[in-house]
Image (cartoon, grey):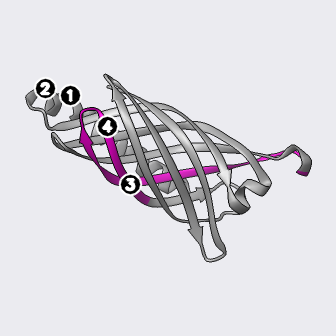
């Protein structure tokens, strides 16, 4: 678990170090973003957990005017429904993907691995996303799911990134 998080953090740092040189030299290049996320569990996941909140970082490579490749990593904390007691579970999503971009609007998807902090569970993660950029601020609506051999846990959410 720590190795996965360290690898993801190192990847983001590499993206960030290269961002300024490439960003200044052309419209292509890297950018880095950080921001909050809010999530609402659905299906079986929603029967046990009420909402989630957290933070994510994103490294983006601007391949062309109309296509971006990205890597996202974060931490989301989901609260147990009050009728079931107290507590929470954490999710660390690690995603890579791409987005079509046009006039500030974007649509795309990411795939990767989601790791839960309790029980050591985790598995394949995917996240279709649609968003809009307001200058340096990017807002994304998404559906995310983590699947393993026992089933899948899904949630919808909103995340925002301030891009450097």
Residue 107 in picture, x, y percent from top left: 34, 47
Residue depicted at 15% across the width and 30% down the height: 21
The crowding category of the residue bearing disc 2, from other C-alpha atoms within 10 Å (few below 14, some 14 to 19, many at least 20), is: few
Magenta span dominant secondary structure: strand
Instruction: Decide which of tag 4 and tag 1 comes sooner along the chain.
Output: 1
Residue depicted at 35% across the width and 51% down the height: 108
C-alpha gap between disc 3 and disc 4:
14 Å
Q: In this view, does 135 lie above or below 16?
A: above
- SS at mark 1? helix
Residue indicated by mark 1: 20
Which numbered tag is attached to residue 24?
2
The crowding category of the residue bearing disc 3, from other C-alpha atoms within 10 Å (few below 14, some 14 to 19, many at least 20), is: many
C-alpha gap between disc 4 and disc 1:
23 Å
Residue 155 in picture, x, y percent from top left: 61, 52
Q: Give the range drawn in magenta.
A: 84-111
Which numbered tag is attached to residue 105?
4
Using residue 69 as the reference point, say whether residue 54 is left or right of it. Answer: right
C-alpha gap between disc 1 and disc 2:
6 Å
Residue depicted at 59% across the width and 72% down the height: 148
Instruction: Decide which of tag 2 and tag 4 comes sooner along the chain.
Output: 2
Residue indicated by mark 3: 109
- SS at mark 3? strand
Check whether the beta carbons of the residues at disc 1 and disc 2 lie within 8 A of each other. yes
Q: Is residue 149 above or below residue 21?
A: below
Q: Is residue 21 above or below residue 86?
A: above
Instruction: Decide which of tag 3 and tag 1 comes sooner along the chain.
Output: 1
Residue depicted at 23% across the width and 37% down the height: 30
């Amino acid at each position: 678990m720590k190795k996965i998080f360290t690898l993801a953090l190192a990847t983001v740092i590499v993206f960030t170090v290269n961002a300024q040189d490439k960003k200044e030299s052309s419209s292509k290049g890297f950018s880095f973003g950080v921001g909050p996320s809010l999530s609402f569990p659905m299906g079986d996941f929603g029967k046990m957990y009420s909402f989630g909140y957290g933070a994510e970082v994103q490294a983006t490579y601007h391949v062309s005017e109309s296509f971006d490749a990205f890597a996202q990593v974060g931490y989301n904390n989901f609260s147990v429904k009050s009728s079931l007691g107290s507590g929470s579970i954490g999710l660390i999503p690690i995603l890579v993907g791409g987005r079509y971009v046009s006039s500030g609007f974007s649509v795309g998807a990411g795939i990767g691995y989601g790791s839960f902090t309790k029980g050591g569970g985790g598995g394949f993660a995917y996240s279709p996303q649609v968003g809009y950029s307001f200058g340096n601020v990017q807002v994304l609506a998404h559906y995310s799911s983590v699947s393993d051999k026992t089933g899948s846990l899904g949630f919808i959410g909103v995340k925002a990134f301030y891009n450097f």
